[in-house]
Amino acid sequence: MKPPSQGNIVRTSAKAVITSKGSILLIKRHSEGEDWYTLPGGGQNKFETLESALIRECAEETGYVIKINEMMFVGEYIGKNHEFSGKDSDIHQIDLHFLCEIGGTNEPGVVTVPDDTQVAVEWVDTGKLGETPLYPKYLRKRIPEYLAGERGKIYIGDLN
């Protein structure tokens, strides 16, 4: 049996929503002359559980050990359907968002495996998410709604 081509791969990604004292932990990135943010977390490896992937990714990107509490919602990103289609046209990713909390640190402030565009780890006021260049964009509205008790649908579809 032939392995699927890279174009047929759907990536599964676990993302952490970590809040404390009215702030959310975000990864600050810089590319093409602009700063922007994402949630900590990343791709699941073959034979790795989502929980293990999220714990590993958060430790690598933030230096924090996390405790996973509950799944919040699931979103998809089909690159050809969105504003970055010029460079993301072959990307299809399923993002599973989990409400998490800090359980400790590996070494405080030490990021061991930052992503290519990662420049910092920052706590951002959750009240300012609407004006923060957080991607995918739907998180700017969906996270505050969830934290305010508006649970809504678990599967929110292909959004940017």
Image (cartoon, rainbow, N blue to C red):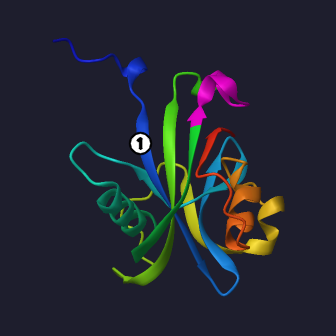
Q: Is residue 25 above or below residue 105?
A: above
Q: Is residue 24 left or right of residue 58?
A: right
Task: Classify 28 as above or below 13.
Answer: below
In the image shown, does 77 or 149 lie closer to the viewer?
Answer: 149
Residue 26 visible within the image? yes
Q: Secondary structure at mark 1?
A: strand
Q: Which residue is mark 1?
A: 12
Rendered location of residue 62, percent (x, y): 46, 70
Q: Which residues are magenta?
A: 77-86
- Is 53 rendered above or below residue 64? above
88 is within the stretch colored magenta: no
Residue 131 % position (x, y): 84, 60
Residue 87 in the figure: left or right of residue 58:
right
Q: Residue at x 68, y 63 (%)?
A: 143
Residue extending farthest to the top is 2
Q: Amino acid at mark 1?
A: Thr
Q: Nearer the viewer, residue 59 or 154?
A: 154
Q: Quadrant of the N terminus?
A: top left
